[in-house]
Amino acid sequence: MMRGTNLKTTDRQKNKIFESRAAILEMAEPGLTMTYSELYPISPASLPTIHTSVMLRRLIDNAPPDHFTLDWLVSSMPGRSYGIVVLFLALLSFVPIVGVGARLLVMFLALQIIFGRRSPAFPQLVMMRKFSSRHLTRMPLVAFRALSYVEKSIRPRWAPILNGRRISGIILFLVSLMSLLLPVPFANVPAAAIIALMALAYLEHDGLLLIVAEALGVGMMILMGALLIGIT
C-alpha cells in the first residue's frame, strides 16, 4: 500500500517539475531553441503516468517539419489513441470554420466508439491527408496552460465509470451534431470544451471528470434542443 502511494507521489512530482520547467522556458529569451522534450526528458517507463498536456507538447516537438497526418498522430500515441485524437479535434473545434470539419470527424469517431471499436480508424484518404505543421506549432501556449490548469485537479479515480464507452460515444455524437445544427454564433465553444473534457477524462482515467463532462453534455443538448425547437 505504501509503495503505491510513493509511486503516485512520484508521478505528481514529475508533472509539477515539468510545469515549473515549462514556465522557465516560456519566460526565457526569444532566441532559446531548447524544446520541451530536451528540457524534460521522460523515460519510456514513465510515459503512461505523464499528464496529457506534457505528452501533447512532446508530440509537437517531434512533429514533422512541414506536414503531419492523422496516421502519424495515432501511431505516435499508442495506448492513448482515441483520447488523443478526440482531444486534438476538440482543440481544433474552437476555431469556427476549421471546427466544422473537426466535429464531423468527432462524430465519425463517436460512431466507432458506440459500435465497440477499440482503436480509431479513418478512411485511408483521411488518415494520409496532409495538414500543415504550423497548426501544431501555433496551438501551444493558451491550450497547454488551460490543460495544465485542469490537470491539477485530475487523477485516476472511479474507474468503473470509464467502462460506459458507448454512453460516452452517444453523448459525443449528439453534442457534436447539435452544435453543427444550431445556427447560433459560438455554439462550437461549449461543444468543444465538453468534447475536450471527455477526452481528458479517458486519457487521465478520471471517472469523476467523465461524469461532470457528460452531465454538462446532457445539459447542453437540452438547452440546444430547446433553442432548435424555438427557432423552428
Image (cartoon, helix red, strand yellow):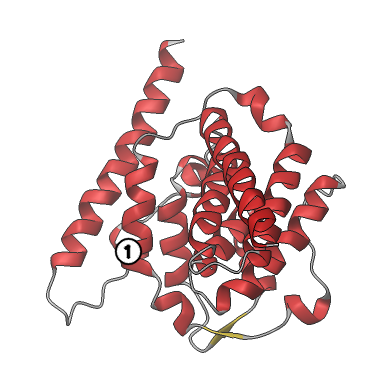
Q: Relative to residue 213, is residue 26 depicted above or below? A: below
Q: Residue 8 in the image: state x and y as whole percent.
A: 41, 27
Tag 1 residue:
142
Find numbered disc 1 in the image and state the secondary structure of the residue it sits on.
helix
Seen at 63% across and 40% down, the residue is 218
Q: Residue 20 in the image: state x and y as whole percent.
A: 21, 50
Which residue extends farthest bottom?
66
Seen at 49% across and 73% down, the residue is 95
Amino acid of disc 1: Val
Seen at 20% across and 57% down, the residue is 23
Q: Relative to residue 23, is residue 96 depicted above or below? A: below
Q: Residue 133 in the image: state x and y as whole percent.
A: 50, 82
Nearer to us in this view, 47 or 114? 114
Which residue extends farthest top?
1
Q: Splitting the image into 4 quarters, where does residue 28 fall?
A: bottom left
Nearer to us in this view, 131 or 208? 208
Q: Residue 61 in the image: state x and y as whole percent.
A: 42, 71
Nearer to us in this view, 3 or 126? 126
Q: Relative to residue 41, is residue 200 depicted above or below? A: above
* Total number of numbered discs in the rendering: 1
Q: Is residue 136 left or right of residue 112?
A: left
Q: Quadrant of the C terminus?
A: bottom right
Q: Is residue 59 visible?
A: yes
Seen at 27% across and 50% down, the residue is 19
Q: Are there few (<14), some (14-19), or many (20+) residues within 10 Å of tag 1? A: few
Q: Is residue 120 visible?
A: no
Q: Relative to residue 39, is residue 218 depicted above or below? A: above
